[in-house]
Amino acid sequence: MNRMSYAAAVCVFVAVFVPGPGFADDKPLIWKPSKTSNTSYSVKLGLKLPTRIETEAGVSMGVNTTSSGAPVDMPLRFWSNFTAEKIKTPAGQFGRDIGVDLDGNTGSAGITMNYYDKEIATPQIDIERRSSYGVHYDGASGEWRGLDASQSVRLSHAASGTALIGRATGRDGFRTVTAGVVMEKKLGTRMTVSGSIDRSSDSAEPAASIKARYFFRW
């Protein structure tokens, strides 16, 4: 049995025999099937280990097909995440986690370290800081790529539902650097409108955008 046939068989087995999300919520099992497009399907399967560092690990399998249903590609990815530190107090939150990904088809891999801090600066203002650092291995060339890094600071005013965000990223060993600002405004409890402007070192002109996001859960 070749790799594509094996991956397809595993996807069918998981979809048919593994209990649904309602069961997974009560157990350490992670099972998240999804349809990413009309011709792409995937399932994320793994386990949450009962340890102090909240370790998760598993595999993501999928199938990409033609419009007639013939398989074209079988993405296969191994992943793991664990929480290095997590603290929650009345004055804020503090978190550190590490993620590892391996592409089962190409041999490419990545390691990402994420940092998160949230503080209540005043009764009306919250400050959130996020940092991410990642290194990537290119399976095709057999080389480690440069460091990727991102930083953001978010100032939120709870009473008005307004937030100001400053962000910066560096890619491929900081060969490309991007910085920008975002303004967000909540309209009611379900809609958020945001406007952003970013400038990249490899672009002559800044990029601006306006977005609206609507959230509803049932």
Image (tube, rainbow, N blue to C red):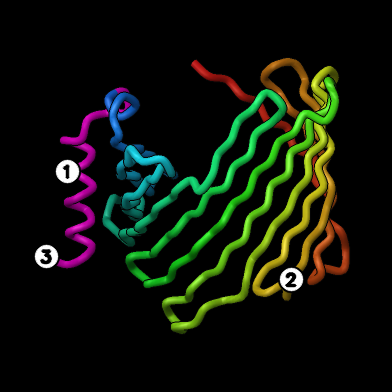
- Residue 173 rendering spot, x and y as whole percentages: 67, 74
Note whether 39 is above or below 106 in the view shown: above
Quarter placement of the N terminus? bottom left
Badge 3 marks a residue whose secondary structure is: loop
Residue at screen point 84% across, 60% down: 199
The answer to whether mark 2 and mark 1 are in CB contact below 8 A is no
Question: Is residue 11 in the magenta section?
Answer: yes
- Give the structural element (helix, strand or loop) at label 1: helix
Dot 2 or dot 1: first in sequence order is: 1
**Residue denoted by label 2:** 176
> To which quarter of the image does residue 93 belong?
top right
Q: Residue at x 28, y 50 (%)?
A: 69
Q: Amino acid at mark 3?
A: Met
Q: Reading the chain from its start, which is encountered first: label 1 or label 3?
A: 3
The amino acid type of the residue labelled 2 equals Thr
Which one is closest to the eye, mark 2 or mark 1? 2
Disc 1 residue type? Phe
The image shows residue 128 at horizontal and vertical percentages of: 74, 38
Q: CA distance from mark 3 to mark 2?
A: 43 Å
Residue drawn at x 87%, y 69% is 204
Return the residue at label 1: 13
The disc label shown at residue 74, or none:
none
Q: Badge 2: how crowded within 10 Å, few (<14), some, or many (20+)?
A: some
What residue span does the magenta drawing correspond to? Answer: 1-22
Earlier in the chain: of badge 3 and badge 2, it is: 3
Q: How far apart are labels 1 and 3 at the CA level?
A: 15 Å
Q: Position of residue 124 (x, y in %)?
A: 84, 22
- Which mark is nearer the camera, 3 or 2? 2
x, y (%) of residue 139? 42, 77
Look at mark 3 in the image and give the residue it sits on: 1
Q: Relative to 52, does residue 77 appear above or below in the rendering?
A: below
Who's the residue at 71% across and 36% down the image?
118
